[in-house]
Image (tube, rainbow, N blue to C red):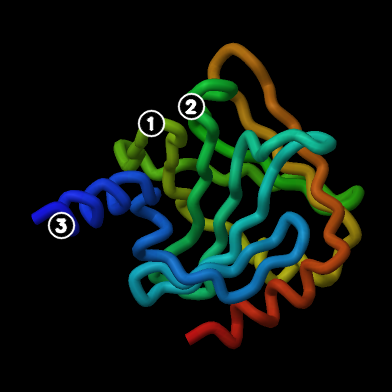
Amino acid sequence: MRVIQIMLGLLLLLPWGELQAKEIYKSGRYTVRKVEGTCKLEILLHEGDQEPAAILALFPSDEYFGEMFTEKARIGVAQKKVRIQFDQEKPKDINFVADASAKDNYWRWQYLENTQGILSMLGKRSRMIVSFSNGKTMFKYTVPLKGSTKAVMALRHCR
């Protein structure tokens, strides 16, 4: 009986996402995970040495487009859209799917309607600027794309 209580206690200490997600590749800002049979590339958005304030997740499948995770305490929920710009190109606005958000104690997340070929651009450009608003403040993160090619390759080989 005591062993069962200890096991249940340990289970509560582990984040649920860790129980369902397998890390396939990790380097710098880039992590490829397999969650419930679906692979995704997570790009950490942060300034300097801080913990990530947001995560942009991209899927290699037409069934899923993308996710945007924002830290509940620092950002809250991103409003309407996320803007992505590569190098000096024209920015692309990507809308969030209406009424498709969720949250836990630490993160808020929403689904992106269409990532407009962002995944294919990662290995071909030198930097990506991701910006969004929570309704009060505009957040802007510059992501150097060095090492993104290996992450995209790991995502494409993930099964």
Identified by mark 2, the residue type is Lys
The residue beneath circle 3 is: 4
Looking at the image, how many numbered discs can be counted on the residues? 3
Q: Residue furthest top?
A: 136
Q: Earlier in the sequence, mark 3 or mark 2?
A: 3
Residue at 46% in and 42% down:
96
Contact (Cβ within 8 Å) of mark 1 with mark 2: yes
Residue at 83% in and 60% down:
145
The residue beneath circle 1 is: 105
- Using the image as rendered, state which of residue 47 and residue 14 is in the foreground: 14
Q: Earlier in the sequence, mark 1 or mark 3?
A: 3
How far apart marks 3 and 2 lie (CA) works out to 33 Å
The residue beneath circle 2 is: 72
Where is residue 41 drawn, in percent x and y? 59, 65
- Using the image as rendered, state which of residue 91 and residue 129 is in the foreground: 129
Quadrant for residue 120, please give it: bottom right
Where is residue 158 drawn, in percent x and y? 54, 83
Q: Is residue 78 left or right of residue 97?
A: right
Where is residue 45 drawn, in percent x and y? 69, 43
